Each structure stands twice: as structure tokens, then as C-alpha cells.
Amino acid sequence: MAKIKVHGLPFSSCTARVLACLNEKQVEYELIPVNARAGDHKKPQYLSLNPFGLFPALEDGCLTLFESRAIIKYLAKKYEGQGCPNLLGSTVEEEAVVEQWCEVESHHFNPPCYALVSQIIINPLKGGTTDEAVVESNAEKLSRVLDVYEDRLSKSKYLAGDWFSLADLQHMPFLHYLVNDVGKATLISSRKHVNAWWEDISSRPAWKKIAVHMKFPSK
Amino acid sequence: MAMIKVHGHHLSTATRLVLCCLEEKQVDYELAFVDLSAGDHKQPQYLALNPFGVVPSIQDGDLTLFESRAVIKYLATKYRGQGTELLGNNVSEQALVDQWCEVEGQSFNPPASTILFQTFVVPIKGGRTDEAVVKMNVEKVVKVLDIYEERLSKSKYLAGDFFSLADLQHLPCTEYLINGCGKGDVISSRKHVKAWWKDISSRPVEESH
């Protein structure tokens, strides 16, 4: 059987999300780097895989998929019987709670994190400047979200319950950037249960293999 | 068995999405009104259901859920075998449903809901619609709809030749864009998007709202 192909870049948060899931499910894959500097992700060959011109895209036999959060759900279902179990829970109700915290990541956690990474890392890389007012307002939004997480994680070892799920995995790339690259580690370390959760999930072997490659290119 | 209880507001797009799904799945429910103008959604009683203080939330027996896109997935899964099938028939089809659901959540909804916010919410709060912000977000919506046009030229619905959660997810916001914000031309100027919209918005469930 042909290996799964992932088109993307190892430091891209969404590519890392998919690679982490493949590792958790012990699925072999081939990473095909896309030359973003040359604009290859906006050319017809890549657009035929992902018409939005974003990373990553996945090929599994005849199936082509994009949107990392959809891809990891597919992998969790297809490979239910191998690797880390119950990434989507083991009942309809558990799956619903996993989906709920996946949506929280998508709509409450991701937007302010993305804004921070854009302002602090991406803009300077492109020769632009950091807007400190935007940084401050998004750090504040993220703080409010993490207060909810702190309360949740004081009652539950992981977001969906007492087992590691896609909901936790979905957060890992931007948590990594927050702690390592944008100078906002205190948002995590100042919250006892959020910090314990991050220490736990970031020490998973499947994640550590990905984290070493999550370095932004220099200018 | 107790009915599903939806805590929400009849004008909220996220609440409407959940109600639409309940109707497609032919599931009885009760709508408990959350008075947003009175700030009920920020009171402890509501925050106990949804700590993010947004509508809707649902209660189904012992289970409380929030995030409308997660709620509709739960309903579509729990009620497989009744009403409209909304998830596809196998793992690959379900992946395509999830993919286009993510597209709605990540690429379509942010600019579309910004247009709605500027048009409806800002004036209610005593401010003025920022037309430059509306224009910028209409341009973003248009870019997404160009991709939909291409997709729908090959496929009757977004995930394939079957109506799914991915199409349903677009209904509430798009209805407001056309009927409340006067942006119907972004739909009607694209042949396949127009045909798709005519089809999904004329489903009996949708016409009753």
C-alpha cells in the first residue's frame, strides 16, 4: 500500500498538527516539502491538492484532503485500531465532548494565538513591524480563554476528560510557539493546571519528534 | 425521555444552525430563550452551561454541550438512521464532510460574520457600520466563493453528491448576508453557487425559519 503523503512544511502549525497525529497513530508517511519562498503553494500543481493554497494537503490513495483539523479526524477514525487509542473517545457522548473542545481550539484559542505569531514572528520575517497594540489585545483575549481552560483542567486531566484526545493534540503546535517563540510562556506557566497539562502533552514521544523541526526559518 | 433543551437566541446564527439540524434529524426539542440584550449569557447560571458565555448550549440528559458545529456533529451521529443523513456513508465521505465544515469555520464564517456584525450589531450598540471593513470582508467572502464555484461545478453539494453538515453549516450566515445585508449578488453572480444556494435554502426545514 502506498504511504500517506503530506504536502507541507515542518514548522507550519497545521502541518505539525497532522504529523503529530500520524505519529500518535503509528502511521508511516512521506513529508513532501512545499517551497513557500518560491510561491509553490499558490501554483496550479499545489492548488489542485488544496484550492485555498494553504498547508497542509494529504494524499491517501485516491483521497486528497486539506484542513488539518479534518485530516486528524480522518486519521483517528481510519486507524482506530492502532497507536494511541480513543483519540475521538469511545462513545458518542465522549466524541461529542472531544469535538466541542476541538471547536474551542478552532474558534477561541487559535485566533488570538495566530495573531500573536503573525505580529511577533511572521511580520518581521517579511520585513514588516510588530503592532504592539494588537499583541497586547490578543494576549488579553488569550488570557481570558486560558482562564476557562485552567478551570476545566482543574477538574479533568485532559480537555475532553481523563484521556488524551484530538482536542489536546490540536492545541499543541500553537502552545509550542507560545512557550518557545513569541515570548508568552508566562501565559501557560502562570496557570497551574494549564502548565501541568502542557508539560504532560509536550512530553509525549510522538510530539517530541515533531517539535524538534518546529523552527521558523531565519530571514 | 426528556427532550433536548437548546439554550439560545432565535436570531443567533449559531443557535439557528443547531435548530436546523434538529429539524433535519426530526428530533423534538425545547428552546430556552437566553436574553442577550439583558446579558443573560454572561450570568453564572448560563456560564455553568457554556463557560465562554456564548450561545447556544444544549442539554441532552446528563450531557451538556456547546459550540454549534460540535453540537450538530453530535446530533448527526446520535440520530443516524432517522431524518436526513448528514455525515456521509463511509470514513472517506465523512472526511470530506469534515473538510468542508472546516472550510466554513475557518475561511467563510470569519469574514461573513464580520459583515453581519457591522451591519446588525454595531448600530444596535449605538455605533456606525464601518463600510471599509464591510468592503474588505466582502472581498474575502468573494475569494472563498470563487473556490466554491469551482468545487460546485463538479459536485452537487460541497462534500459530494449528498447534502451534508457542510452545506447545512452555511445556511444561517448566508441567509443573513442575502436578506439582511444586501449582499445577495455574491451568491447570484456565481452560477453553481447560486444553484446550490437555491437548492439548500428551499429545503422544507429551512423554509420554515
Image (cartoon, rainbow, N blue to C red):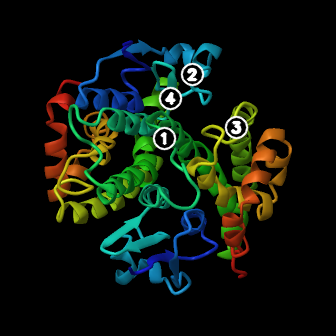
Give B134 or B188, whichever is nearer the viewer. Answer: B188
Left or right: where A176 falls relative to A81: right
What is the x, y in percent for residue B200? 18, 42
> In the image, what residue occupies the spot 50% across and 24% down?
B63
Q: Please give the residue where the numbered disc 2 appears in the rendered image.
A: B49
Same-chain check, marks 3 and 2 = no
What is the x, y in percent for residue A199? 80, 53
Q: Secondary structure at mark 4?
A: strand
**Crowding near the residue tagged with mark 2, few <14, some 14–19, many ≥20 C-alpha atoms within 10 Å:** many
C-alpha separation, residue under disc 2 versus residue under disc 1: 18 Å
Q: Please give the residue where the numbered disc 1 appears in the rendered image.
A: A95
Same-chain check, marks 2 and 1 = no
**Crowding near the residue tagged with mark 1, few <14, some 14–19, many ≥20 C-alpha atoms within 10 Å:** many
Q: Secondary structure at mark 2?
A: loop
Q: Secondary structure at mark 3?
A: helix
Q: Please give the residue where the numbered disc 3 appears in the rendered image.
A: A149
Q: Chain of mark 3?
A: A
First-in-chain label (3 vs 1):
1
Say which amino acid is labelled 3: Tyr
What is the x, y in percent for residue B27? 28, 23
C-alpha separation, residue under disc 4 versus residue under disc 2: 8 Å
Q: Which mark is residue B65?
A: 4
C-beta proximity under 8 Å, tags 3 and 2: no
Q: Nearer the viewer, mark 3 or mark 1?
A: 1
Say which amino acid is labelled 1: Glu
Q: Chain of mark 2?
A: B
Q: Which mark is residue A112?
A: none
Q: Chain of mark 1?
A: A
Q: Nearer the viewer, mark 1 or mark 4?
A: 1
Q: Secondary structure at mark 1?
A: helix
First-in-chain label (4 vs 2):
2
> In the image, what residue occupies the spot 17% across and 65% down?
B154
